[in-house]
Amino acid sequence: MNFAPTEEQKMVRDMVKKFAETEIKPIAAELDKTHRHPEEICRKLGEMGIMGVSVPCEYGGAGMDNVAYVMAMIEISKACASCGVIVSVNNSLYGHPVKTYGTEEQKHKFLEPVASGKVEGCYALTEAGAGSDAASLKCRAELKGDKYIVNGTKTFITSGNVATYCVLAATTDPASGYKGVINLIVDLKNTKGFKVGKVEEKMGILASGTSELVFEDAEVPAANLLGKPGQGFQQMMAGLNAGRIGIASQAIGIGRAALEDALAYSKERVQFGKPINTFQAIQFKLAQMATELDAAELLVLRAAWLEDNGLDFEKESAMCKFYASDVAMQAAIEGVQIFGGYGYIKEYPAERHMRDAKICQIYEGTNEIQRVVVARKLLGLR
C-alpha cells in the first residue's frame, strides 16, 4: 500500500497550491462580499488544465487522474470555496457525463471549451419537486422530428447564471419514472425559449452563482442527446458518484482552511498571560480537527483511486462525501469557537468557512441520502 503521490500528482498539487495562495486567497473575502463570479480565476485555472483535470488532452483537459483532481480541489477550496465548487461542477457534474457518454462530435463541440476553461458548464437536475427523489422529474423533453421541445424549470443550479453549456436532465414521460429520464446537452447562450430565472441569495459560497433555469418550448437538437433514450438515470447516478468526490474534496479544503486559520490565531491570541494554544481545551479541538480531516482525505483519495482504476466506487464516494462534509462543518464550528468573538465578525475568515461548509452537507445528495446509498450497498439492496 503506497500513500505517496506520483511525481505528476505532486506537480499538480504544488502548482495549484502556489496559485491558490498567491492569486485566489488574497481576493477570497472580496469575492464573498461582492458575490461576483471569479471569471479571471477560471480562465487562469483553465490555462493550467484544472477546469478539466481528468479530461483527455484532445478534449481540452489536462489528461491527469482523479487523485490529482482531488489534490487540486482541496488546495483551491482551501483558498476559496466558491472557486472550488465552480471547478468541481466543470470537472464532475458537467465534464463526467459528456466525457463518458458523449460522441466524438459532442466531446469536441461541448466538452473541449469547458475543460479548457474558456467557458463554464453546469448540470441541471434539481427541481422544486425533484431533489433527493431524482426520478420524479417534471421538466419535459418531447421529441418532435430532429428536435426535443423542452418545458420546465430547474432550481439551485450551480453556475447556472454564467454557464455556456448545460447537461440537462429531463423526462420524456413523467409516468415512466427513471426509465423516462434522458440527458441533453444544451447551448444556453443560443437556445430560444431558455432564460436564466432567479439567482438565489445564499448563506455561503457567495461567488458561485446558483440560479433557476427556465425552459419554455425550448428547442434542443436531438443530436445533443447523451447516449440513448432510457439511459439518462444511469448516467445521472454515475455522474453524481463522480461529483461527490469533488464535493468531498471541497469540504476538506474548507475544513483545512478553518484548521490553519485557527492554528495561526491560537498562537497570537493571549489570555491569562499565555497564548491560547497552550490550553488543553484548545489543543484538543485542534487535534480532533486535524485527525478527522486526515481521515476524510484518505476516504476521498480511496474513492478517487477506485474510479481511476475502473472499480466500483459508489459506496466509497457516498462515504467520503458525507464524512468529509460533516467533518468540515465541525471543523468550521470549532474554528469559530477558537476565534471567540472575532470568529463571529466578517473581519476574520472563520465565519466565512462556517457559512461555506454547510452546503457541502446538502448538495450533490444530502448526507442523509449518502447514508442510504451506503446502507443499501452494505445490505445488497438495489
Image (cartoon, rainbow, N blue to C red):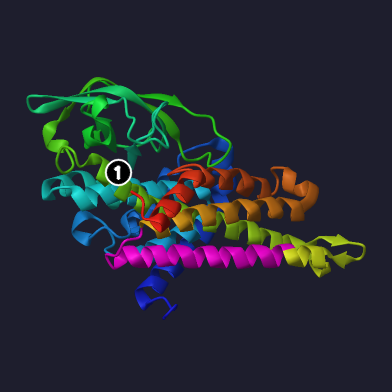
Q: Does residue 68 appear anywhere in the picture?
A: no
Instruction: Identify the residue at image location x=37%, y=77%.
Output: 6
Residue 120 in percent (x, y) is at 33, 43
**SS under mark 1:** helix
Instruction: Identify the residue at image location x=58%, y=36%.
Output: 203
Residue 98 in percent (x, y) is at 23, 47
Residue 72 in percent (x, y) is at 43, 61
Q: Main secondary structure of the magenta part?
A: helix
Of the pair 6 and 174, the residue shown nearer to us: 174
Residue type highlighted by circle 1: Met
Of the pair 214 and 22, the residue shown nearer to us: 214
Which segment did they paint magenta? 285-313
Residue under label 1, please give it: 236
Q: Quadrant of residue 215?
A: top left
Say above or below: 85 vs 68.
above
Which image quadrant: the N terminus? bottom left
Q: Does residue 96 appear anywhere in the picture?
A: yes
Total marks in image: 1
Instruction: Identify the residue at image location x=45%, y=34%.
Output: 210
Residue sitting farthest toward the right:
272
Residue 343 in percent (x, y) is at 73, 48
Say above or below: 251 vs 212.
below
Say above or below: 275 vs 165.
below
